[in-house]
Image (spheres, helix red, strand yellow):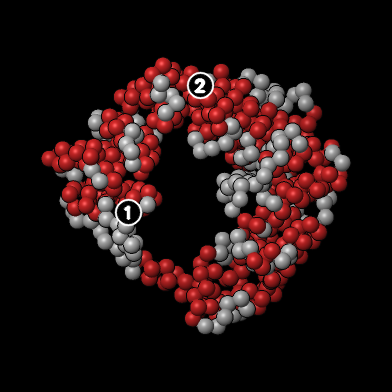
Amino acid sequence: MFEPVIAPSASLLGLLQRGRGDGQLHALAADRAEALAALEECVTSDPRSDWQVENRSLYYARLYMELEAPLSGLEHHLHDLADVFDQDEGRTGLALAVLGHLAAYGRRDALDLLRGYTAVGTNWAWALDELALRDDDRSLLSLAPAVLARFPEDERGEAELRAAIRSAYEPRPWRLWAAQHPRIAAASEQSPFDLWQRQLNRSGVTPGWSTADVFAWADQAEPGSDGGSPDSGAVARRAAAAARCLAAVVRPQDRDAVLDAALVGAPGARIAALRYLADQQDPAAPALIETAAADIDERIVTAALELVGRMRGPEVLGHARRWADPDSGGADSALGEAAVQLLADSGEPCDGPLVVAALRRWLSVRGVGGAGLGTLVDGAGRLAAVHAVPALRHIYGEAASSELRGRAARALAVTDPHFARGIAVECLWDCEETTRELAARHVTTTGDVRVLERLRRLAADPAEEAEVHAAVRGRLTSRDRT
């Protein structure tokens, strides 16, 4: 799947793609045709890089309601010929989720679109889940023949039917249908036994119950492979399992063997030993991980850097400060970056300057994105590093990820003295419920007429999350609203 193309943050489209509160405010003030075009572009071309951690559907649905937008663009998108050939649920998932919210708001045309797509669309299961939350029993019952016709009456079709029932997010339609359709009733009864049978029949080679046996097992090829060198993912998975086994079988007299494996062992055994030592907070672990981070085998290096984040304790923080110290030249190394991530996650207030320096360096080299930036943002907030405020504001405004923007907002809430009167106001319209909740708890309710009106609308919106309702109502009923 291609990364979405995100427009500049100052444009209406860019604001809406990011799910920023200013996107809604600008859309309501912009030319209606321009606003509708930008909104439709967002819903039919999902701007999220990871839809599982970023919310947009309620945000866009609210804007559809505010603009009284027609649904013809969504209808064309759902029934486009591409729906037949593109099996990726991400192509239509956002549009279906938006329609679900619109149906909950009382849009009959949205409900009809979901019903029609359930009958003929590729991503019918998602549409059915949306209907399960909003439609009446009679309408759901009328969809049963169209859904059942998707599954041939043969062995493969019955297996696919059981899988569909088992994976349904909302079981309500299937329970309704089971009362009238014997095939669905039988599949519903058989589905749990399929899962039980698969768990019983799991096969695979298991390690023997000694330290040497576990190390030997850690370097075996994955079952079913061609016997060649396992890829890094396979090695890491087996090493993680082996490390858990070591926790059960290692005896005091085995420590020398574990240390030797961690220093010069084969890849699987070495990674397992390193992980075991890190989990046990063994005093030898930091030095062995530092050595592994300079290895020529990329699998060993990757594992060592990941293990830095698993370590805890005052002595480990001392090693991390040394690895991340710019004066030693380690700050620009992979080990230095992993160390500052550890300091951001569990360091002390004295580590704030190192975290802020790493945050600025990240932005200058990588920009606003990449795995690891969120940890630095969280660390700046956790350590109350006020010098990070300019960088955090930049991340808040430019981040394409609404999840990352929310983390920046949380950090700003404890570092930026102007947060309550500034960014918090915009956050009341944000696409992320956690960001709206944060804003409701911090925003200053005097001086901006929009704030109290927005709080009242959030309190009255049945689609809003319970946590946001609680925060908003707490502010509205408080005697001190400043």
Say which amino acid is labelled 1.
Answer: Ser
Q: What residue is rendered at 58% in x and 47% in y?
A: 50
Q: Position of residue 250 (x, y in %)?
A: 19, 44
Left or right, 206 with respect to 471, comes to: left
User: Is residue 343 in view?
Assistant: no
Q: From the viewer's side, name the closer residue of 470 and 271.
A: 271
Q: Which secondary structure lies at badge 1?
A: loop
Residue linked to disc 1: 229
Q: Position of residue 85 (x, y in %)?
A: 64, 66
Residue linked to disc 2: 357
Q: From the viewer's side, name the closer residue of 247 and 480.
A: 247
Question: Mark 2 vs mark 1: which is more N-terminal?
Answer: 1
Q: Is residue 431 above or below residue 235?
A: above
Left or right, 336 with respect to 430, comes to: left
Q: Position of residue 1 (x, y in %)?
A: 59, 53
Say which amino acid is labelled 2.
Answer: Ala
Q: What residue is rendered at 63% in x and 74% in y?
A: 147
